[in-house]
Amino acid sequence: LKAQASYSQKQQVTVLLNKPVGYVSGQAEDGYKPAKILITPENRWAGDDSTLRWSSAQLRSLVPAGRLDIDSVGLLVLTQDGRVAKAIGENSTIEKEYIVRVADAQSGQAPKFAAQTLALLRHGLSLDGKALLPAQVEVLNDDELRFVLKEGKKRQIRRMCAAVGFKVLRLKRVRVGRVRLGALPPGKWRYLKDNERF
Protein backbone atom coordinates (compact mmCIF):
# COMPACT_ATOMS: atom_id res chain seq x y z
CA LEU A 1 0.00 0.00 0.00
CA LYS A 2 2.85 2.35 0.85
CA ALA A 3 4.46 1.62 -2.54
CA GLN A 4 1.12 2.33 -4.18
CA ALA A 5 0.79 5.65 -2.34
CA SER A 6 4.27 6.75 -3.34
CA TYR A 7 3.57 5.66 -6.93
CA SER A 8 0.41 7.78 -7.02
CA GLN A 9 2.37 10.74 -5.57
CA LYS A 10 4.94 10.28 -8.33
CA GLN A 11 2.12 10.47 -10.88
CA GLN A 12 0.99 13.80 -9.44
CA VAL A 13 2.32 16.64 -11.53
CA THR A 14 3.38 20.15 -10.63
CA VAL A 15 3.62 22.70 -13.41
CA LEU A 16 5.15 26.16 -13.54
CA LEU A 17 3.28 28.73 -15.63
CA ASN A 18 4.40 32.21 -16.63
CA LYS A 19 0.96 33.73 -16.09
CA PRO A 20 0.02 36.64 -18.35
CA VAL A 21 -2.25 39.52 -17.28
CA GLY A 22 -5.98 38.82 -17.52
CA TYR A 23 -6.11 35.31 -16.04
CA VAL A 24 -7.18 34.47 -12.49
CA SER A 25 -5.15 31.96 -10.47
CA GLY A 26 -8.05 29.83 -9.31
CA GLN A 27 -11.63 29.25 -10.42
CA ALA A 28 -13.13 31.27 -13.25
CA GLU A 29 -14.74 34.40 -11.81
CA ASP A 30 -16.70 37.32 -13.27
CA GLY A 31 -16.10 36.09 -16.78
CA TYR A 32 -12.31 35.97 -16.32
CA LYS A 33 -10.50 32.86 -17.46
CA PRO A 34 -8.61 30.63 -15.01
CA ALA A 35 -4.86 30.33 -15.68
CA LYS A 36 -5.27 26.54 -15.78
CA ILE A 37 -6.74 26.74 -19.31
CA LEU A 38 -3.24 27.65 -20.54
CA ILE A 39 -1.96 24.19 -19.56
CA THR A 40 -2.31 22.61 -23.00
CA PRO A 41 0.15 20.59 -25.09
CA GLU A 42 0.44 23.56 -27.50
CA ASN A 43 1.46 25.95 -24.71
CA ARG A 44 4.15 23.69 -23.27
CA TRP A 45 7.48 25.51 -23.43
CA ALA A 46 9.82 24.10 -26.11
CA GLY A 47 12.66 24.41 -23.58
CA ASP A 48 10.99 21.97 -21.14
CA ASP A 49 13.30 18.94 -20.98
CA SER A 50 11.06 16.93 -18.64
CA THR A 51 10.42 13.34 -19.73
CA LEU A 52 6.80 13.63 -18.54
CA ARG A 53 4.21 13.34 -21.28
CA TRP A 54 1.18 15.59 -21.20
CA SER A 55 -2.19 13.99 -20.57
CA SER A 56 -5.58 15.59 -19.89
CA ALA A 57 -5.74 13.58 -16.64
CA GLN A 58 -3.09 15.96 -15.31
CA LEU A 59 -5.65 18.77 -15.37
CA ARG A 60 -7.88 16.97 -12.88
CA SER A 61 -7.42 18.43 -9.41
CA LEU A 62 -4.62 20.70 -10.67
CA VAL A 63 -4.85 23.68 -8.31
CA PRO A 64 -2.85 26.88 -7.84
CA ALA A 65 -0.47 26.81 -4.89
CA GLY A 66 -0.63 30.44 -3.79
CA ARG A 67 -2.35 33.17 -5.78
CA LEU A 68 -1.21 35.69 -8.32
CA ASP A 69 -3.88 38.31 -8.97
CA ILE A 70 -5.42 38.98 -12.37
CA ASP A 71 -3.24 42.06 -13.05
CA SER A 72 0.01 40.35 -12.06
CA VAL A 73 2.31 38.23 -14.20
CA GLY A 74 5.01 35.66 -13.66
CA LEU A 75 5.53 32.41 -11.83
CA LEU A 76 2.33 30.59 -10.92
CA VAL A 77 2.64 27.07 -9.51
CA LEU A 78 -0.20 24.63 -10.25
CA THR A 79 -0.08 21.22 -8.62
CA GLN A 80 -1.93 17.97 -7.99
CA ASP A 81 0.36 17.29 -5.03
CA GLY A 82 -1.12 18.32 -1.68
CA ARG A 83 2.35 18.51 -0.12
CA VAL A 84 3.45 21.14 -2.66
CA ALA A 85 0.19 23.08 -2.23
CA LYS A 86 0.69 23.10 1.55
CA ALA A 87 4.40 23.99 1.35
CA ILE A 88 3.88 27.10 -0.77
CA GLY A 89 0.20 27.96 -0.33
CA GLU A 90 -1.54 30.79 1.49
CA ASN A 91 -0.11 30.29 4.99
CA SER A 92 3.39 29.26 4.03
CA THR A 93 6.46 31.31 5.04
CA ILE A 94 8.45 30.29 1.97
CA GLU A 95 10.07 33.26 0.18
CA LYS A 96 8.41 34.72 -2.90
CA GLU A 97 10.30 37.26 -5.01
CA TYR A 98 8.73 39.96 -7.18
CA ILE A 99 9.96 42.67 -9.54
CA VAL A 100 7.60 45.64 -9.22
CA ARG A 101 7.45 48.71 -11.46
CA VAL A 102 5.93 51.70 -9.70
CA ALA A 103 5.04 55.34 -10.29
CA ASP A 104 4.26 58.18 -7.93
CA ALA A 105 0.50 57.82 -7.33
CA GLN A 106 -0.06 61.61 -7.51
CA SER A 107 2.06 62.67 -10.49
CA GLY A 108 2.36 59.40 -12.40
CA GLN A 109 6.09 60.17 -12.71
CA ALA A 110 9.01 58.02 -11.58
CA PRO A 111 8.82 57.76 -7.79
CA LYS A 112 11.28 59.07 -5.22
CA PHE A 113 12.67 56.13 -3.28
CA ALA A 114 13.31 57.95 0.01
CA ALA A 115 15.13 56.02 2.74
CA GLN A 116 12.19 56.34 5.13
CA THR A 117 9.73 55.07 2.46
CA LEU A 118 11.90 52.00 1.88
CA ALA A 119 12.21 51.48 5.64
CA LEU A 120 8.39 51.48 5.92
CA LEU A 121 8.04 48.99 3.08
CA ARG A 122 10.64 46.72 4.69
CA HIS A 123 8.97 46.76 8.08
CA GLY A 124 6.39 49.08 9.49
CA LEU A 125 3.18 48.63 7.51
CA SER A 126 -0.03 46.95 8.62
CA LEU A 127 -2.82 45.51 6.50
CA ASP A 128 -6.28 44.75 7.85
CA GLY A 129 -5.14 45.81 11.33
CA LYS A 130 -2.23 43.35 11.45
CA ALA A 131 1.45 44.22 11.22
CA LEU A 132 3.15 42.69 8.19
CA LEU A 133 6.17 40.44 8.52
CA PRO A 134 9.48 42.11 7.59
CA ALA A 135 10.07 42.15 3.83
CA GLN A 136 13.23 42.58 1.77
CA VAL A 137 12.80 45.59 -0.50
CA GLU A 138 15.59 46.86 -2.78
CA VAL A 139 15.74 49.53 -5.45
CA LEU A 140 16.61 48.03 -8.85
CA ASN A 141 16.46 51.22 -10.94
CA ASP A 142 14.51 54.51 -11.30
CA ASP A 143 11.09 52.89 -11.20
CA GLU A 144 11.56 49.27 -10.13
CA LEU A 145 11.74 47.58 -6.74
CA ARG A 146 12.54 44.00 -5.84
CA PHE A 147 10.35 42.58 -3.07
CA VAL A 148 10.97 39.33 -1.20
CA LEU A 149 8.04 38.36 1.02
CA LYS A 150 7.44 35.50 3.42
CA GLU A 151 3.67 35.96 3.48
CA GLY A 152 1.05 36.47 0.82
CA LYS A 153 -1.89 38.56 1.90
CA LYS A 154 -4.40 39.45 -0.81
CA ARG A 155 -2.93 42.10 -3.15
CA GLN A 156 -0.27 42.67 -0.50
CA ILE A 157 2.41 44.41 -2.60
CA ARG A 158 -0.14 46.67 -4.32
CA ARG A 159 -1.57 47.67 -0.94
CA MET A 160 1.91 48.18 0.58
CA CYS A 161 2.86 50.43 -2.33
CA ALA A 162 -0.41 52.39 -2.10
CA ALA A 163 0.27 52.96 1.61
CA VAL A 164 3.50 54.85 0.73
CA GLY A 165 2.08 56.76 -2.25
CA PHE A 166 3.15 54.47 -5.10
CA LYS A 167 0.98 53.05 -7.87
CA VAL A 168 1.97 49.62 -9.17
CA LEU A 169 2.34 49.58 -12.96
CA ARG A 170 3.59 46.02 -13.31
CA LEU A 171 4.06 43.20 -10.83
CA LYS A 172 5.96 40.07 -11.80
CA ARG A 173 6.71 37.08 -9.57
CA VAL A 174 10.12 35.65 -10.48
CA ARG A 175 10.76 33.11 -7.72
CA VAL A 176 8.95 30.85 -5.25
CA GLY A 177 11.34 29.38 -2.68
CA ARG A 178 14.30 28.05 -4.68
CA VAL A 179 12.34 27.68 -7.93
CA ARG A 180 12.84 30.50 -10.44
CA LEU A 181 10.77 31.64 -13.42
CA GLY A 182 13.97 31.79 -15.48
CA ALA A 183 13.56 31.90 -19.26
CA LEU A 184 9.98 30.57 -19.30
CA PRO A 185 8.10 32.82 -21.80
CA PRO A 186 4.75 34.48 -20.95
CA GLY A 187 1.79 32.13 -21.41
CA LYS A 188 4.03 29.05 -21.52
CA TRP A 189 4.41 26.31 -18.90
CA ARG A 190 6.77 23.52 -17.97
CA TYR A 191 6.86 20.63 -15.53
CA LEU A 192 8.66 21.00 -12.19
CA LYS A 193 11.89 19.02 -12.52
CA ASP A 194 12.62 16.06 -10.22
CA ASN A 195 15.62 17.88 -8.74
CA GLU A 196 13.76 21.16 -8.14
CA ARG A 197 12.62 21.86 -4.59
CA PHE A 198 10.76 24.88 -3.32
Image (cartoon, rainbow, N blue to C red):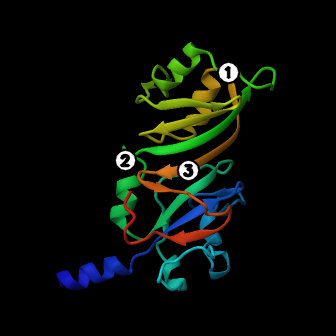
Mark 1 lies on a secondary structure that is loop
Report x, y in % for residue 17.
Answer: 58, 64
Report x, y in % for residue 160.
Answer: 57, 28
Which residue, given by chain and number where applicable, does mark 2 sit on? 92
Which residue, given by chain and number where applicable, does mark 3 sit on? 174
Quadrant including the C terminus = bottom left
- Of residues 130 and 142, the one nearer the viewer is 142
The residues tagged by marks 2 and 3 sit, at their Cα atoms, a distance apart of: 17 Å
Q: Residues within 10 Å of mark 3 (few under 14, many from 20)?
A: some
Instruction: Tell me the kind of residue under disc 3.
Output: Val
- Of residues 15 and 1, the one nearer the viewer is 15
Q: Which mark is residue 165?
A: 1
Lower sequence index among marks 1 and 3? 1
Depicted 64 relative to depicted 97: above or below = below
Instruction: Tell me the kind of residue under disc 1.
Output: Gly
Which residue is found at the position 41% from the left and 40% from the top? 150
Lower sequence index among marks 2 and 3? 2
- Of residues 115 and 30, the one nearer the viewer is 115
The residues tagged by marks 1 and 3 sit, at their Cα atoms, a distance apart of: 24 Å
Which residue is found at the position 54% from the left and 84% from the top? 54
Between disc 2 and disc 3, the foreground one is 3
Report x, y in % for residue 13.
Answer: 44, 74
Q: Residues within 10 Å of mark 2 (few under 14, many from 20)?
A: some
Instruction: Tell me the kind of residue under disc 2.
Output: Ser
